Amino acid sequence: MLGLIGYEGDSVSDALKTYADRVGLKAVRVTNPAAWTTTISVPGGDDVAMISPSGERLTCAVNRGLPSSSSLTEGENNDVLAAWWAGLAMMSGPVVNRPDATGFIPSPIVQSTILTTDVRQYASSLPGAVTANVHDAVSGTFQYRVGAQEHTVFAPVASVTRFDPSRTWRLMIAGHELIDVSVPTAGLLSGERRSAAAALRRMQACGLVFALVVFSRIGETLDIVAINPLPTLSHYGRQQERVHSSLLKWLRP
Amino acid sequence: MRKHGLDGELIDLGYLVMRGNVTLPLNGQPGRITLAGRTISVEQPVVARLIDISRVAPTPELRRRAEGVQVSLARYLSCLPWTQVVGGTWDNSNFSKAYQLSCASGRSWAVPRTCVTNDPSVAKAFVQSVPTIYKGPSSSKTWANVMSANDIDRLPQLRHSPVLFQERITGLDVRVHVVADKVFAEAITATLCDYRTDPDARFEPVTVPSSIAADCIDLTRKMKLVLSGIDFKVSESGQWFFLEANSAPCYQGYDKRAFGAISDALSEYLRRADAYRPT
């Protein structure tokens, strides 16, 4: 059975459940992991059993973050997370966003990003044609776009990424497929698309199978400016059917 | 470090949160810290001890700022070559003890039979099959306890959150500190299950078998760490059992008893960090 792990109201998990039901793939939303029965045994085969309240066993999963329970203490929630970390990391079936040593949801580093407490000073140093998106460095929540809006930064530490909106390409990695979701698609040369696709194939080979990746050409260089392993429906809505089909095909080989 | 002629900037995390600014690129270039009117370039090598101070921040604003600064520093440090960072932040595997045990399996040491579960019947079968200790499965601080008859009666309470049950190994506790390619080990004799709670615990240097030492060094490298603290139990028959690898060990007491050998090794490493190439 496929587990769609994510908070109540996670529209992607809900949409994947709807799609799975439609194509006859048994799936369950995991919104209260503390109610599940988890057993992880080490060593010798690394046995994992993650059983739903109705008695069904998880065999594969889409991990979009483990909901915590308000009825548990922080320590107890940590214990549940630690168990699910081990369970999903060691599960023999396919797992989207499989936990590893770096984190419960591995987050690739975007090298073109700057983390700063002084956004104003950094933004003022940008050349005219280039803008930047500003996000909260902790939550990842979008704050504003330099030049397009007022400097209203609420995040004490911001993640700032330069890009050129007229030379940007957005791609979804979904299972074995790479799906262009650029709005609009413009400005990138075919050679750049090939090198971008090669970079994405390398990410797929390293286990990134469901993510939004954004490329932008700044000057002569094509940079990755965003890698989001928790894309929302707004990122790929126009290609939703194709993205979900490809992802579930990967989960059910 | 000063005793060894090493110079550097000491940056207090709390002071940085309250009074400073950071600008940290994630492309491996030096970051910048501004503090007390000075701008400090974050040059490699770096020694870091990132402790979550947000919990003790006096205001919600400072709490958010502390979280942001810590997350940003951790992310920045993970972009630097790991050989240039003491106190590296790449590996968080010890948050989940069962996961880390799984990663550490298949080496010259053994791994105790371990079961993380919130199923009372599974737990009961386990504790009835081997002498057992139990502790929390995450890095949230808990003490290890020997399973008793009273504890078996309490197993139905497991439903609320999982517990780590582990085969009890009777024998010496050994803490091994690894600094790059050097190993420092101390055996601890204690009467209580968790020696950290035993005021009468005795400590003495111990020699580590070469295969165990080599695997400690290799595991530390795989975790992309320069410094680690690895806990073992050595059974009465001499078999070494891996318990846990700590990426931010509190090594001061061990260092003091070793007459500063761990600090000496760290200082020597920092002096030649540019040239270090793991084999």
Image (cartoon, helix red, strand yellow):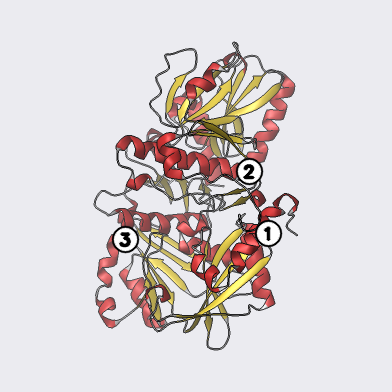
Element marked by disc 2 = loop
Residue depicted at x 69% and y 17%: A219
How far across and how far down the image is residue A43, in percent? Answer: 53, 70
Q: Which of the 4 image quadrants contains residue B78?
A: top right
Question: Could one spot residue A45 in this view of the protein?
Answer: no
How far is disc 1 from disc 3 in space, using C-alphas?
45 Å
Q: Are marks 3 and 2 in one subunit?
A: yes
Which residue type does callout 2 highlight?
Leu
CA neighbours of label 2 inside 10 A, class few (<14), some (14 to 19), many (20+): many
Decide: is A67 above or below A154: below
- Most extreme residue toward the bottom is B237
CA neighbours of label 3 inside 10 A, class few (<14), some (14 to 19), many (20+): many
Residue at which label 3 appears = B161
Residue at which label 1 appears = B268
Which residue type does callout 3 highlight?
Ser
Q: Chain of mark 3?
A: B
Confirm or deny contact between disc 3 and disc 2 (CB under 8 A): no
Decide: is B138 above or below B42: below
- Earlier along the polypeptide chain: callout 1 or callout 3? 3
On the rendered structure, is B120 left or right of A21? left
Q: Nearer the viewer, mark 1 or mark 3?
A: 1
How far is disc 2 from disc 1 in space, using C-alphas?
20 Å
The label number, if any, that marks residue A151 in the structure image = none
